Image: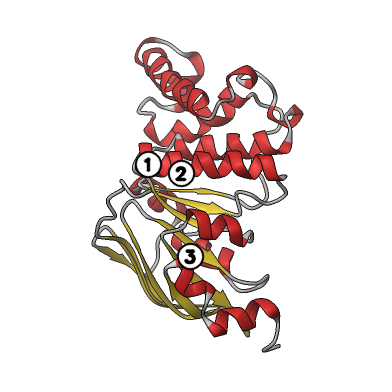
Amino acid sequence: MAARKIGDVILDVKNISLAFGGVKALTDISFNVREHEIRAIIGPNGAGKSSMLNCINGVYQPQQGSITFRGQTFKHMNSRQVAEMGVARTFQSLALFKGMSVLDNIMTGRNLKMKSNLLMQAIRIGPAQREEIEQRAVVERIIDFLEIQPYRKTAVGKMPYGLQKRVDLGRALAMEPQVLLLDEPMAGMNVEEKQDMSRFILDVNDEFGTTIVLIEHDMSVVMDLSDRVVVLDYGKKIGDGAPDEVRNNPDVIRAYLGVSH
C-alpha cells in the first residue's frame, strides 16, 4: 500500500440528491475519489450506499447535482456510457449466468471490447474468430490472476459462493475499468473467503492500478483496505476522511451504535 502513488481526483461527486416519490434516498452528497486509491462508502443499512453507486454508474438519475469523471461533467449518464468511459461494477446480489461456465461469464465482460457484430461472433469466421481468440486470452489471464483455473469450464451455479463472487469480480475486471465499483464484495463470506477477496482487491488496485470505490459492512475490512472513507446515514453524509479519522468521528459512532435513533 505504501508504494502506491495516489493521483489527482478522477471522480468528483457534487451535491447529489435522489428521491423516489416523497422518499429522499440521498440529500446533497459530495465527495471525490482520487486515482489509484481505495475509497470506501460505509453506513448502516438504508443509509443510501447502493443508491450512491447506482447514481455513479448511471442506473439512477439524480434530481440534483453532477458527477465529473476525468474532467467531464455529467448531470445524467446511462449505464452503457459509464461502462464505455471505463467504470465497471459488481453487485450486492450476484447477477451471474448460473448455467454458463466461468470462462463464458467472464467473456461477457469483454463485449464492449468486441468490434465484430453479433452475427460474425455467432458464426466465428475470419476477423471474428481471431478477435474471440484474443479476447479469450485476456479472460484466461484474469482466471489465472483470480486463481480459479480448476473451475474455468464449470457452470457457475455449481461453485461455492465465495468463488462465484470471484467470478463476478473477474467479469468486471474483463472490462479493463479505470474505476471499479464494488457493492459489498464480502457479503455472505466466511473469514477465509474475506481474506482471499481482500487480497484480490489489493492486488487489483496495486498491480492493475485500478481505482476502487467499495461498499462494505465489515469495518475491519474497510479500515484495513481503504485510503479514505465516506460515511452516509439516512442519505446524508456524516463523515469523510482517513480511516482513523472516521473511526473516531462522534457522528459516525452515534450512527453505528444507534444512540441518535
Dots 1, 2 in contact, CB < 8 A: yes
**Pointers 1 and 3 in contact (CB under 8 A)?**
no
Q: At 46% from the left edge and 58% from the top edge, which residue is drawn?
A: 226
Q: Position of residue 43 (x, y in %)?
A: 60, 71
Q: Earlier in the sequence, mark 2 or mark 3?
A: 3
Quarter of the image for residue 164 reads top right
- The local crowd at label 3, few if under 14, some if 14 to 19, many if 20 or more residues have their Cα within 10 Å, is many
Residue under numbered circle 3: 55
Seen as rendered, the residue at the extreme bottom is 260
Q: Is residue 53 visible?
A: yes
Structural crowding at the residue carrying mark 2, measured as other residues with C-alpha within 10 Å and reported as few (<14), some (14–19) or many (≥20): some
Residue at screen point 60% across, 49% down: 185
Secondary element under disc 3, as helix, strand or loop, is helix
**Residue 158, quarter of picture:** top right
**Which residue is disc 1 drawn over?**
206
Cα–Cα span, label 2 and label 3: 25 Å
Taking depth in this image into account, of 171 and 110 the one nearest to the observer is 171
Which numbered circle lies on residue 202?
A: 2
Percent position (x, y) of residue 81?
A: 38, 52
Q: Amino acid at mark 1?
A: Asp
- Identify the disc placed on residue 159: none
